[in-house]
Image: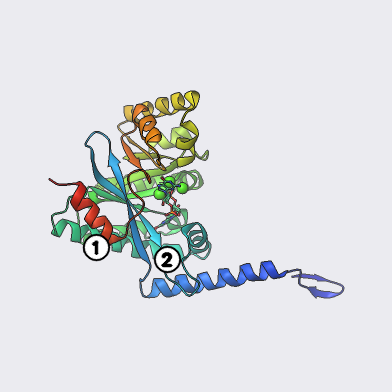
């Protein structure tokens, strides 16, 4: 709305109103789902090249059912971030993931660690460390079963906070992973100064490198640098056999993508791990 000598004029057109209304509905859905913790968690298996099994997985939030139908993370995550709802949602997610790990361990289904995505907004919370440790302790799972994944842009926005958080979490054995590497935000010196367990190379980079000798060579070089620093390198978005081959050729340690599996419901993930990780 704009105030001028003709009074307040709204330039909002129908499309914009529709957008605002949808946003409002999504905010309400997020609040409802947070209140009764009814959003779903999916899990995408991550393949370990050397071991030939699936020790890791990434947790991904889903809203499959709502009054306006399924809503995709690309739409609801930014809204959850803008409204700050992501902060409490993340604690609920962490708790759900811990409970899932607990159930797997009770059933003797082998699982290494599960990645949980942390949005940059999370790092504005002064009690973040206590909250995270508290949730993991309450659930009585080994701290090493959780890996906190945050993006390059988060690291670029608050390098100090993230570095301190990583160091503190490391003391307790909680792992840290950098997501979206190569999307162009972070300072390489900052990246290598943090004790990341894993660096995940963004899917756009993986896709650009397939069949492209120059960028394949660049990836190989980056992978070697991280490996020399004792970091594992993960490739995401791997869909085809050709991409698997080029990831392995580049020395990538772990591979995540539709080639192995799409994100699975908890039930399907449990079955997947039981079938693919026999001891
Ligand atoms: P991300 O963290 O980079 O997650 C990887 C995304 O790539 C996921 O999309 C996954 O389903 C997708 N993906 C995996 N393998 C392939 C593949 O082979 N091909 C293609 N085309 N895509 C693949 P998703 O689940 O839609 O999530 C999108 C983004 O939303 C995530 O990107 C993350 O930034 C955010 N997000 C999702 N769940 C959560 C969550 O629980 N917390 C937070 N903070 N963010 C989340
Ligand atoms: Ca991620
Ligand atoms: Ca990613
Ligand atoms: Ca991403």
Q: Secondary structure at mark 1?
A: helix
Q: Which residue is pictured at 22% across the width and 47% down the height?
A: 112
**Marks 1 & 2, CB-CB < 8 Å contact:** no
Q: Which residue, given by chain and number where applicable, does mark 1 sit on?
A: 99
Mark positioned earlier in the residue sequence (1 or 2): 2
Number of numbered discs overlaid on the protein picture:
2
What percent of the width, then of the height, locates residue 39? 38, 68
Image position, residue 242 (x, y; %) = 40, 33
Q: Quadrant of residue 106?
A: bottom left
What is the crowding at mark 2: few (fewer than 14 residues within 10 Å), some, or many (at least 20)? some
Q: Which mark is residue 141?
A: none
- In whole angstroms, how far apart are the C-alphas of marks 1 and 2? 19 Å
Looking at the picture, how far across and down is residue 258, in whole percent? Answer: 38, 46
Give the residue drawn at x 15%, y 47%. Answer: 278
User: Residue placed at 51% from the left, 40% from the top?
Assistant: 183
- Rendering coords of residue 42 (x, y %): 34, 58
Where disc 2 sits, the SS reads loop
Tell us which disc is closer to us: 1 or 2: 2
Q: Label 2 belongs to which residue?
A: 63
The colour style of the image is rainbow
């Amino acid at each position: 709305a704009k105030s001028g000598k003709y009074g307040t004029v709204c330039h909002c057109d129908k499309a914009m109103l529709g957008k605002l209304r949808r946003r409002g509905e999504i905010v309400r859905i997020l609040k409802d789902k947070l209140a009764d913790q009814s959003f779903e968690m999916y899990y995408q298996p991550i393949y370990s090249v050397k071991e030939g099994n699936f020790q890791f997985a990434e947790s991904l939030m889903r809203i499959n059912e709502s009054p306006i139908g399924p809503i995709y993370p690309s739409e609801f995550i930014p809204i959850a971030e803008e409204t700050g709802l992501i902060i409490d949602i993340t604690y609920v997610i962490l708790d759900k993931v811990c409970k899932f790990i607990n159930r797997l361990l009770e059933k003797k289904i082998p699982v290494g660690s599960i990645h949980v995505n942390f949005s940059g907004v999370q790092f504005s919370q002064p009690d973040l460390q206590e909250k995270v440790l508290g949730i993991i302790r309450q659930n009585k799972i080994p701290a090493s079963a959780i890996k906190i994944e945050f993006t390059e842009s988060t690291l670029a926005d608050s390098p100090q906070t993230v570095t301190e958080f990583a160091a503190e979490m490391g003391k307790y054995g909680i792992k840290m992973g950098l997501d979206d590497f190569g999307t162009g935000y972070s300072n390489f010196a900052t990246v290598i100064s943090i004790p990341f367990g894993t660096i995940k190379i963004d899917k756009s980079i993986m896709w650009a490198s397939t069949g492209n000798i120059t960028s394949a060579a660049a990836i190989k070089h980056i992978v070697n640098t991280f490996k020399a620093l004792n970091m594992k390198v993960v490739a995401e978005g791997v869909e085809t056999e050709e991409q698997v081959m080029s990831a392995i050729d580049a020395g990538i340690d772990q591979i995540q993508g539709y080639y192995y599996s799409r994100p699975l419901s908890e039930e399907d993930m449990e079955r997947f791990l039981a079938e693919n990780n026999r001891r």
